[in-house]
Amino acid sequence: MSYSNTQVAALTTTEVAALTTTQIGTFTSAQVGLLTTTQINAVSTTQISSLTTTLIDGLTTTQIPTLATTQITGVSSTHISSLTTTQVDALTTTQISPLTVSQFGGLSSAHIGSLTTTQIGVFSTTHVASLSTGQLAGVTPAQVTALTTTQVSPLSSTKIGSLTTPQLNGLTLDQFKTLTSDQMSKVVGATSERIAVTGHANPISQGAGTINTGYQSVAGYGHFIGILSLGAMGATSTVDAKITQATDANGTGVKDVAGLAMTQITGAVGGGNKNVIFEIRPENLDLTNGFNFITLSVTVGTAASLLSAVVIGVNPDYAPTSGNIFPVRQVVG
């Protein structure tokens, strides 16, 4: 026996709940899509488990978010793998959180890549650990950035090593800090091939005034890290530092990069012997208007302070780095 669209639409929740798996199996995918959310809520876990992938594919993006977590348990990995990215995008965070490893395995790389950072945010460490390299291929740089340090930790070194340069560029400084030695070794093989000193201010006792690391082009690298190292400071000395951007290596049109100025350090409160790290990403810069050069600018006030500064290019776009500027004499190891 098959049902007409009119009969399906007329079913009460009691009648829906009473349908055998054989009866519900006679529905078409279009008829599944006709069910109201109230009717959908009456479908049992057993009935959902019995659905073919064709019928599961009939679920609409209006129906999917209304499925209870108990109903989600009836959805198999085969069901999930047959869903479109639009259907997967309709899953709520409450529905994603309890997915089993088996169900999670049904997600394709396309499914993973279409999820919002909010949805990615509810992945458990078990979920993350279960991701295959194939699934990881779909992860976007923005999704990588959105991962917490706790979520990054269960990724094996092999999986870390499978990430592409754009994906690695999504790693934040906090995430880098939590990588184990095994994970870090797989980020790109030899670490020295993934970084280059692109700007510097040699160690100096700097009197009142401003120095910088020279303006370097941002072309060819995923992002940059600036490091200011302070030694002994005069009791009345102050140090300010910031990242500035310009349109050429001469500093033409120089202007500040929003959000990349440090809080002033003073010698009066024991501010010496400290390091400050700046993380510079393409999205921080006014690239649209040609501001393709950056520098780490350091200003000392009143009394001299010992300091040095360096800017490091991270993750070259195309090949291992060979762009260390002249102060780098040796790369050992």
Image: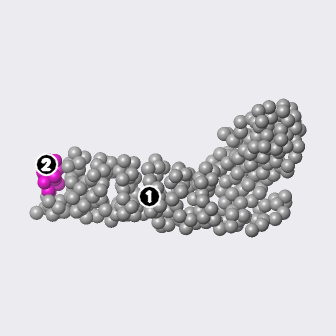
The answer to which of 257 and 297 lies nearer the viewer is: 297
Q: Mostly what secondary structure, the magenta segment?
A: helix
Question: In terms of image quadrants, where is residue 58?
Answer: bottom left
Q: Is 9 within the magenta?
A: yes
Q: Name the residue that disc number 1 marks.
A: 126
The amino acid beneath tag 2 is: Thr
Mark 1: secondary structure: helix
Where residue 34 appears, as percent x and y from the top left, is: 23, 52
Q: Which residues are magenta?
A: 4-19
Q: Name the residue that disc number 2 marks.
A: 14
The amino acid beneath tag 1 is: Thr
Q: Is residue 76 left or right of residue 105?
A: left
Q: Please, which colouring scheme is shown?
A: one colour
Q: In which quadrant is the N terminus drawn?
A: bottom left
Residue at the left extreme, as displayed? 1
The answer to which of 55 and 289 lies nearer the viewer is: 55
> Which sits earlier in the primary sequence, circle 2 or circle 1?
2
Residue at the front extreme, as displayed? 270
Mark nearest the camera among 2 and 1 is 1
Q: Is 162 within the magenta?
A: no
Question: In terms of image quadrants, where is residue 307?
Answer: top right
- Residue at 75% x, 52% y: name it: 311
- Residue at 16% x, 47% y: name it: 13
Question: Is residue 333 shown above or below 204?
Answer: below
- Residue at 77% x, 57% y: name it: 197
